[in-house]
Image (cartoon, rainbow, N blue to C red):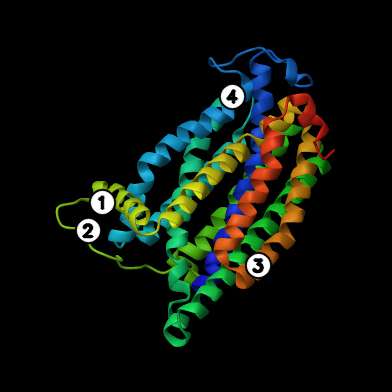
């Protein structure tokens, strides 16, 4: 039951990620216009709005969201582990993302800054929701582990993860095609296309989240939903929910450094790589529009190509992990990303432009 819910939750994640592509492009254009810039010549935009350059809007938004998450993630993790509120965390964050996505459909020259501020809520809710979703993953194979052992359960989790990644990427492909297609058919501009996308995606994810997180979906005969869970462990004596999350992170890192130093170094490396690529994905549209002078259609096409290429990669990931193990796959992919993207991102704009796929 919950495996299908887990996969459908990833579908919603894919739709939300793609909605941000259209929204960020629209907000960048609206911010540039508010700063008195020509949207057809963004590379020469020198104006400011709310004390920031238009291209800094999304990086500032991500920075605020990152600060909030750094403070709140240990607490949310402690609530999931040490209370029976895991499902409620998933429900509240899912509802928050759906409502915010619908609200952002009002994006216009009068509301773009409010829509940008709402993006902080969306980013935080998305990350907190992922914590609740991932907490269910080990339990999806609990029965298999009891019957056939840890190795069989680990392989099944790899299968579920790869399927989830494939579903998410497939949803991103469908979302970008549908939203761009509808916008093109009705003759909508960049901003109106973003508004249409937010409305469509908001309705879609609210309905799917209702199916997989609400007990009321049983009335439709739907059975593939997340179920309530008890706490995994008690709060240590002398600690509170506020402090136990931070202490658990500290003790885990110290324990890894003392007993498994190479695992500790791998973890630090993964953290740095994830942070770097998370930051770049946040400003990817900004980079293409301001540094590479790509128009909105080209931005959409490039992202679509990347997503289509990612689909077979999601399938190959499961085969690679079964054959070589997660450790070697993580090392190989990390080295590849650094060797390929490092020189490109540090190159002068003119040289980077020549490296642009189109």
Residue marked by disc 3:
320
Contact (Cβ within 8 Å) of mark 3 with mark 2: no
Note whether 42 is above or below 233 in the view shown: above
The residue carrying pointer 1 sits among few (fewer than 14), some (14 to 19) or many (20 or more) residues within 10 Å by Cα, namely: many
Dot 3: element: helix
Rounded to the nearest whole Å, what is the CA distance between mark 4 and mark 2? 41 Å
Residue marked by disc 2:
235
Earlier-in-chain disc, 4 versus 2: 4
Image quadrant holding the C terminus, namely top right
Rounded to the nearest whole Å, what is the CA distance between mark 1 and mark 3? 37 Å
> Looking at this view, is 117 or 74 the one in front?
74
Give residue 87's position: percent from left, percent from top.
39, 61
Give residue 294's position: percent from left, percent from top.
79, 31
Which numbered circle lies on residue 287? Answer: none
Contact (Cβ within 8 Å) of mark 1 with mark 2: yes
Earlier-in-chain disc, 3 versus 2: 2
Residue 200 seen from this side: no
> Looking at this view, is 166 or 12 the one in front?
166
Dot 1: element: helix
The residue carrying pointer 4 sits among few (fewer than 14), some (14 to 19) or many (20 or more) residues within 10 Å by Cα, namely: some
**Which residue: 67% across, 31% down?**
346
Note whether 35 is above or below 249 in the view shown: above
Rounded to the nearest whole Å, what is the CA distance between mark 3 and mark 2? 38 Å
Earlier-in-chain disc, 3 versus 4: 4
Toward the left, the furthest residue is 238
Residue marked by disc 1:
244
Earlier-in-chain disc, 1 versus 3: 1
**Which residue: 50% across, 60% down?**
210
Which dot, 3 or 4, sits closer to the camera?
3
**Which residue: 36% across, 43% down?**
72
Residue marked by disc 4:
56
């Amino acid at each position: 039951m919950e495996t299908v819910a887990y996969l459908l939750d990833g579908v919603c994640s894919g739709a939300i990620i793609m909605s941000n592509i259209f929204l960020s492009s629209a907000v960048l254009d609206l911010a540039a216009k508010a700063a008195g810039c020509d949207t057809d010549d963004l590379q020469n935009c020198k104006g400011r709005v709310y004390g920031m350059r238009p291209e800094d809007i999304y990086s500032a938004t991500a920075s605020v969201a990152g600060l909030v998450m750094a403070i709140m993630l240990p607490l949310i993790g402690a609530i999931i582990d040490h209370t029976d509120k895991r499902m409620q965390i998933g429900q509240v964050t899912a509802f928050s993302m759906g409502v915010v996505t619908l609200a952002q459909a009002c994006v216009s020259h009068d509301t773009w800054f409010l829509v940008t501020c709402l993006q902080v809520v969306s980013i935080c809710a998305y990350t907190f929701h992922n914590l609740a979703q991932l907490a269910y993953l080990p339990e999806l194979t609990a029965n298999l582990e009891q019957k056939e052992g840890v190795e069989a359960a680990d392989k099944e989790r790899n299968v579920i993860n790869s399927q989830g990644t494939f579903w998410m990427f497939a949803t991103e492909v469908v979302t970008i095609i549908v939203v761009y297609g509808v916008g093109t058919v009705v003759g909508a501009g960049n901003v109106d296309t973003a508004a249409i996308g937010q409305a469509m995606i908001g309705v879609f994810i609210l309905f799917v989240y209702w199916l997989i997180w609400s007990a009321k979906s049983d009335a439709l005969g739907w059975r593939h939903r997340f179920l309530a869970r008890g706490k995994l462990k008690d709060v240590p004596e002398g600690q509170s929910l506020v402090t136990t999350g931070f202490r658990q992170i500290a003790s885990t890192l110290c324990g890894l450094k003392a007993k498994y130093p190479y695992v500790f170094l791998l973890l630090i490396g993964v953290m740095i790589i994830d942070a770097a690529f998370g930051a770049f994905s946040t400003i990817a549209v900004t980079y293409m529009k301001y540094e590479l002078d790509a128009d909105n259609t080209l931005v959409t096409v490039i992202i679509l190509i990347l997503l289509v290429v990612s689909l077979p990669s999601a399938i190959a990931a499961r085969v690679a992990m079964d054959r070589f193990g997660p450790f070697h796959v993580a090392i190989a992919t990390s080295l590849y990303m650094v060797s390929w993207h490092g020189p490109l991102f540090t190159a002068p704009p003119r040289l980077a432009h020549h490296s642009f796929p189109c």
